Image: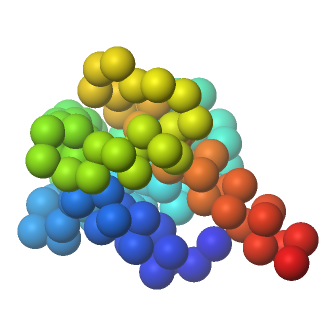
Amino acid sequence: MSELEIEYLIRALGIGATYRGYRYLNYGVKLCLRDEDYLLSVSKLLYPQIAKNYHTTSSSVERDIRTVIRVCWERGNRRLLQEIALHPLDSQPTSSEFLDILTAHLRQKEAAEMLV
């Protein structure tokens, strides 16, 4: 999965690069695509790894990712988010849910492209 495809999906959801969380989310999705264990322990594994890469704190990463999720939910492309989630979203997804939705969508897309 190319970094451009991850960026395109994040931008299509209405999250712009002007948010710090954009970069954190992009890198986090890339890590989750490489190793699904990150999805099992977002707070203990994923946030610290992102923080280390960007020379910041885990709490800053968590807050900034929550911010971009809120932006997507309130002002972004909620219809696309609902579509790729493959199930109804009655409330704003948690960070773990959001990362899982994006990762699963990109994996499915990659698998479909391999079949062609």
User: Would residue 54 be seen by someone viewing this image from the given angle?
Assistant: no
Q: Is residue 90 above or below residue 37?
A: above
The C terminus sits in image quarter: bottom right
User: Would residue 86 be seen by someone viewing this image from the given angle?
Assistant: yes
* Viewer-nearest residue: 104 or 50: 104
* Viewer-nearest residue: 17 or 58: 17
Q: In the drawing, does residue 37 fall left or right of residue 42?
A: right
Q: How is the image coloured?
A: rainbow
The N terminus sits in image quarter: bottom right
* Quadrant of the rendered image containing residue 96: top left
Q: Is residue 46 above or below residue 2?
A: above
Q: Is residue 50 above or below residue 94?
A: below
Residue at (29%, 20%) from the top-left corner? Answer: 91
Residue at (18%, 70%) from the top-left corner? Answer: 17
Give residue 73's position: percent from left, percent from top.
Answer: 22, 39
Q: In the drawing, does residue 74 fall left or right of residue 54?
A: left
Residue at (33%, 65%) from the top-left corner? Answer: 12
* Viewer-nearest residue: 74 or 27: 74
